[in-house]
Image (tube, grey):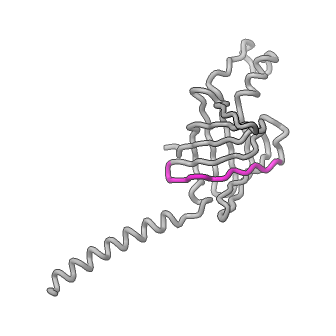
Amino acid sequence: MSTPRTATRLAVAGVCLALAAGLACAQGKSLKEQIVGTWTFVSSVDVTPDGVKTDRWGPGASGIFFFDRDGNYAQFLTRADIPKFAGKRVDAGTEEEMKAVMKGMVASFGTYTVNEADRVVTTTVKGSVYPNLAGVAQKRAVTSLTADELRYTNPTTSTGATAQVIWKRAK
């Protein structure tokens, strides 16, 4: 075999190995390293204990989920059709307006841990618009995670349903 041909083959093999190593490193990131960042809401399907599937958030829903490197999170999710308060002040809402907010919004913050082996992210609520969640640990089983998309199942939402949720990485 000639020396230039051998050198070319070695160079090509070296490039291939370098590319493969780069892919392996990217794929070798821990689940926690991969979820860190900002995610925007795509969709959610709630499944009730009797198997009924619903879209609790409706068309145009929006939300954001933050995970930082230090184990803190914040999540906000809202329906698009929550009516504005007629009273024009946050403390001047009617009972019906307040009820619409409570039924159409999730907001919480706290800490999170990751069980790499089980692919479970557990959030522990410090504060929430629903005060009964304070101190509660909520498990989310990650079913799919790419650089741009996070899918998980929350087996026990505060409404008693199981939620299958999709988020995309914020750009």
Task: Report the residue that reaches farthest toward the top.
Answer: 86
Residue placed at 53% from the left, 67% from the top?
28
Residue 48 image offset from top left, x and y in percent:
73, 36
Residue placed at 48% from the left, 43% from the top?
171
Q: Quadrant of residue 52?
A: top right
Task: Report the residue that reaches farthest toward the front.
Answer: 50
Q: Considering only vertical position in the picture, is 134 above or below 122?
A: above
On whether residue 22 falls in the magenta region, the answer is no
Residue range in magenta is 136-148
Q: Considering only vertical position in the picture, is 68 above or below 5?
A: above
Q: Considering only vertical position in the picture, is 78 above or below 21?
A: above
Residue 118 image offset from top left, x and y in percent:
67, 61
> Of 6 and 67, which appears nearest the observer?
6
Say left or right for 18 vs 155: left
Residue 128 image offset from top left, x and y in percent:
78, 39
Residue 95 image offset from top left, x and y in percent:
82, 17
Image quadrant occupied by the N terminus? bottom left
> Of 58 and 68, which appears nearest the observer?
58
Residue placed at 40% from the left, 69% from the top?
20
Q: Name the chief secondary structure element in magenta.
A: strand
